[in-house]
Amino acid sequence: MNSPKLMHCQVPIQLIVAVLLVIWPVALTIGCTTPVARTELAPAPARAASPSKPSEITLNSPIMHQNLPIAAKLLRSGQFVDAQIVLRSILRDRPDCARAEFLLGIAVMKEKHYGEARPWLESALARNQDFPERIQVDHFLGWTCYYLGDLESSKRHFQSHVGAVPTADDSYFGLGVVAIDEDRIADAEVALQRALELIGTNSQRLRDRSKALARLGDLELRREHADEALAFYEESALLWPEHYEVWGKLARMYESLNRPSDADQARTKQQAVMQRSGRASPAETAP
């Protein structure tokens, strides 16, 4: 006969066994070391942060000044020195005015003082102030950096601009020019063809179309496709006869093809165009 004490002890033992039978499969599952279980429990790898798009940037209120419209008008009319005088006066009153910095950067850039223009443009962009031309700052920084020989920064600013303005043909053209200088021929062709698509056949855009065609000629010359390069150069000159740079390229091409008469005519046209534009020498070239 079982004693009360023994009966009292058997009940907890039965409960313990029952509990073990329930939790044992769970314990086995938690202790499993199969790859599937570890993959499911492992945290997802962190992704690299992507740069903020222009639309994602929170812009501050613009800093206003009564003389900003005057400076903008002077800039549009090509009075770059006068515009600089007005803008420097504005910045003495309001040194935190991003639009004045941007306009001053453009005025200085137009005078080909790229080293001085770059800090003004960069400061205007860094302030994150809202002003009418803000979306264009990256475009002008792209060209400023290009002329300073900073191809990596130039490419970054052009890419930022086409990201914000997908129809920005001149920034695609800029990407093509940078790619040529970096010897990325396939990338250059894609960018220049995109620029041509956006430019279209509008008679008001013949100058821009001519410039892009001339750069495609440069690509074919890199590929040692002389006939294709010559065709692009000739089409470029036909579209915009005032393109003095392409006349120089044609002169060199004709010389290499043993066509001295055509070379002389191209060089004569180049000199005439340069005199009309007030340029002193063929060295003063632009993309």
Image: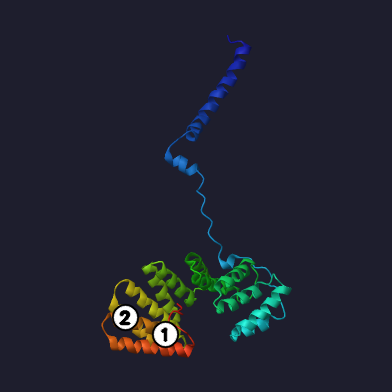
Q: Which mark is residue 253?
A: 2
State which quarter of the image contains the N terminus.
Answer: top right
Work out whether mark 2 precedes mark 1 in sequence or the reverse, and give the earlier one. Answer: 1
Amino acid beneath label 1: Tyr
Q: Which residue is the extreme one toward the right? A: 93
**What's the residue at 41%, 75% (across, down)?**
192
Q: In this view, does 11 lie to the left or right of 150?
A: right
Q: Provide the secondary structure element on which disc 2 rests.
A: helix
Residue 275, horizontal then vertical, whole percent: 46, 89
Q: Specify whether residue 240 is in view.
A: no
How many numbered discs?
A: 2
Q: Viewer-proximal residue, 148 or 205?
A: 148
The C terminus sits in image quarter: bottom left
Q: Are marks 2 and 1 in contact (CB under 8 Å)?
A: no
Q: Residue furthest left?
A: 258
Quarter holding residue 220: bottom left
Instruction: Please give the name of the residue rendered at 29% of the width and 73% of the height, measured from the top-left corner.
Output: 224
Q: Position of residue 58 (x, y in %)?
A: 63, 66
Query: In the structure shown, which secondary structural element does the residue marked by tag 1 occupy?
Result: helix
Comparing 182 with 280, the one in front is 280
Residue type at tag 2: Met
Scheme of colours in the image? rainbow
Give the numbered dot on residue 244.
1
Image quadrant of residue 246? bottom left
Q: Is residue 10 left or right of residue 92?
A: left
Mark 2 surroundings within 10 Å by alpha-carbon count, few (fewer than 14), some (14 through 19), many (20 or more)? many
Q: Which residue lies furthest to the top in this view?
A: 1
Residue at (58% x, 10% y) in the render: 2
**Residue 233 in sight from this viewpoint:** yes
Q: Would you identify the image quadrant in which residue 214 lies? A: bottom left
